[in-house]
């Protein structure tokens, strides 16, 4: 095992499985994705730390645990099609790409989006499509999705995203009345015109900025 592999296994054992994440797909995927390839070179040594890290432009790569929790909550399975809003570094998209068939991810910040695309290409993730633009409207041309993950806090659940869920599809999104704290929600499309909403836990994300986010 290389040093990075050993650190990755320790991260999964201590920070992820150790805190109650049980989904074997998530644990297996996180043992594979080289997180050091998704952070700034000068922060590579901190790649497996138990916290978010700056990626520039005031944005962060999320704490590994929260990435795991969100993907577990989304119940992503092999063969599925996934949409992520807020590509950031591209790391969470890579973890989902280890499990799902196809991942679309959207980043509103062009420079971050280009860097994330490079990270994903270098790490060999050919089943991720990165788009630059406002993800609060989703990606109707690629819908429906089995799972949609939003990695930024929204003032409410965007209708556009609910409508892009397949029947049985799950939307995981932090929702909060202020830009600082949110409740992680799971919205499941139970029928063509029916959605079930569950509140999962308190979280803290950067704001979702866009047409169905904050201005
Ligand atoms: N999933 C990322 C972390 C995301 S941080 C990772 O693994 O590294 C949240 C990201 O959402 C930021 O990069 C921010 O620029 C982006 N963002 C905010 N509003 C957005 C919007 N409307 N559409 C797309 N991306 C958005």
Image (cartoon, grey):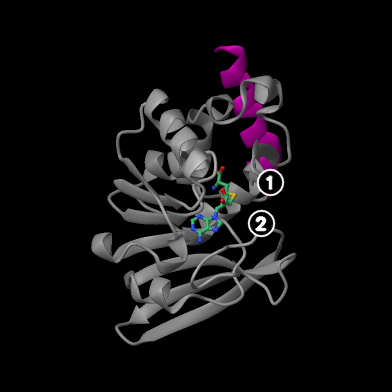
- Locate residue 106 relative to residue 71 in the image: left or right: left
Residue 215 sits in which quadrant? Answer: bottom right
Q: Residue at x 52, y 48 (%)?
A: 109
Q: Residue at x 35, y 76 (%)?
A: 163
**Percent position (x, y) of residue 148?**
43, 61
Q: Residue at x 42, y 52 (%)?
A: 106
**In the rendered structure, which disc, 2 or 1, sits on the residue that comes first in sequence?**
1
Q: Quadrant of the image for the N terminus?
A: top right
Q: Is residue 163 visible?
A: yes
Q: Secondary structure at mark 2?
A: loop
Is 41 in front, or is 163?
41
Q: Nearer the viewer, mark 2 or mark 1?
A: 1
Residues at circles 2 and 1 in contact by the CB criterion of under 8 Å: yes
Q: Pick whichever, 123 or 48, lies toward us.
A: 123
User: Can you say whether 84 is above or below 113 in the image?
Assistant: below
Against 144, residue 77 (above or below) is above
Q: Is residue 90 visible to us here?
A: no
Could you classify mark 2 by the number of other residues whose Cα lies within 10 Å: few (under 14), some (14-19), or many (20 or more)? some
Horizontal and vertical percent for residue 66? Answer: 63, 50
Q: Which residues are magenta?
A: 1-19
Report if the beta carbon of the residue with label 2 is closer than 8 angstroms to ligand 1. yes
| Secondary structure beneath label 1 | loop
Residue 3, magenta (yes or no): yes
Q: Is residue 101 above or below residue 180?
A: above
What mark, if any, has residue 58 been given in the picture?
Answer: 1
Residue under label 2: 206
Task: Give the main secondary structure, helix, strand or loop, of the magenta stretch.
Answer: helix
Is residue 65 one of those drawn in magenta?
no
| Quadrant of res 80 | bottom left
Give the left or right position of residue 188, taking residue 167 as reference. right
């Amino acid at each position: 095992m290389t040093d990075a592999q050993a650190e990755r296994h320790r991260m999964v054992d201590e920070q992820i499985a150790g805190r109650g994440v049980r989904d074997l797909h998530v644990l297996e995927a996180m043992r594979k994705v080289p997180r050091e390839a998704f952070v700034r070179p000068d922060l590579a040594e901190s790649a497996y730390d138990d916290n978010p890290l700056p990626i520039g432009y005031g944005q962060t790569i999320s704490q590994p645990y929260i990435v795991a929790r969100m993907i577990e909550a989304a119940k992503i399975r092999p063969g599925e099609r996934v949409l992520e809003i807020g590509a950031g570094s591209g790391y969470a998209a890579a973890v989902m790409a280890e499990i799902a068939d196809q991942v679309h991810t959207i980043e509103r910040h062009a420079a971050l989006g280009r860097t994330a695309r490079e990270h994903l290409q270098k790490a060999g993730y050919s089943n991720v499509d990165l788009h630059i633009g406002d993800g609060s409207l989703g990606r109707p041309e690629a819908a429906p999705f089995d799972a949609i993950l939003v990695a930024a806090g929204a003032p409410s659940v965007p209708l556009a995203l609910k409508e892009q869920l397949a029947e049985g599809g799950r939307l995981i999104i932090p929702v909060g009345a202020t830009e600082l704290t949110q409740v992680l929600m799971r919205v499941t499309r139970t029928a063509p015109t029916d959605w079930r909403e569950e509140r999962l836990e308190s979280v803290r994300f950067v704001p979702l900025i866009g047409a169905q986010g904050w201005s």
